[in-house]
Amino acid sequence: MYLWLGWGYADRISLPHAGRGLRRRAGIHARRGPDHLGVPPCELLPDRGEIAGALSLSRTPVREAFLALEARGLIRLFPKKGAVVTALDEAETAELLQVRIMLETTAVRLLGEREGGTGGVDTDLAALIEIQADAAASGDLLTFARADHRFHSRIVDENRNRVIDGFYAQLGPRLERLTHRVASRDPRNLERLLAEHRTLAGHVSSGDTAAYDRALREHVEAGHFSTRVA
């Protein structure tokens, strides 16, 4: 599990992506920049001046990006010492996934009660499943993890609550890290996750909230707790 200071978050966390001010001010896109500054969890990041030099930036946007990363729980800042990459332990994993289950099941229930059907949601979920299928075929775990989070986020969107949307967006990078961890430890997990997403999408389409709840809990437990990660 590494933090890469050029692009991509999940288990590789994007400094430019997580710090939107950095992207705006420096014009760095999510898939550009050096990808050679890997730092394992619980270790100090390179000095901000070193990172700024590697990205051809001033220290200010790097400092802003560090603050954004800390706000998302991806690093911890220590005054006069530097920044340390956080590690996801089992307690935090369980808490993050508990929030996912709570928000998603509520959204599916609301969607089932809403007039007009689920056509728009069905179309979006199908498209995201296709993105994941293509990413799995090419071994692109970062794209797979991002699409995985977008799948779940699309369902949470149906709460139609701006406070929930903002809160869930803050959790996005850490949830993507979880998926990337599951996908990277065993490539066979990609097909299993895809199959489970297809099942979840089917329950959304049919409006079967109880079945969705059961399938989501199985999806979470099989993916994140069937094999303990050190």
Image (spheres, grey):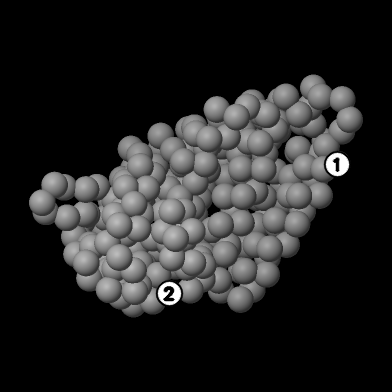
What percent of the width, then of the height, locates residue 157? 66, 36
In the image, taking residue 132 as reference, residue 37 lies left or right, namely left
Residue projecting furthest to the right? 116
Q: Is residue 87 visible?
A: no
Density class for disc 1 (Cα within 10 Å; few <14, some 14-19, many ≥20) is few
Which dot, 1 or 2, sits closer to the camera?
A: 2
* Among the 4 quarters of the image, the one containing residue 44: bottom left
**Which residue bears the numbered disc 2?**
33
Q: Residue at x 49, y 59 (%)?
A: 24
Position of residue 37 relative to residue 68, above or below, is below
Position of residue 55 relative to residue 20, above or below, is below
The answer to whether mark 1 and mark 2 are in CB contact below 8 A is no
In the image, taking residue 99 as reference, residue 85 lies left or right, namely left
Identify the amino acid type marked 1.
Gly
Density class for disc 2 (Cα within 10 Å; few <14, some 14-19, many ≥20) is some
Q: Residue at x 22, y 70 (%)?
A: 50
Q: Quadrant of the C terminus?
A: bottom left
Identify the amino acid type marked 2.
Gly
What percent of the width, then of the height, locates residue 194? 65, 57
Query: Front-most of 63 and 191?
Result: 63
* Among the 4 quarters of the image, the one containing residue 12: bottom left
**Which residue bears the numbered disc 1?**
119
Secondary structure under the numbered disc 1 in the rendered image: helix
Secondary structure under the numbered disc 2 in the rendered image: loop
Q: Residue at x 73, y 62 (%)?
A: 130
Query: Front-most of 176 and 46?
Result: 46
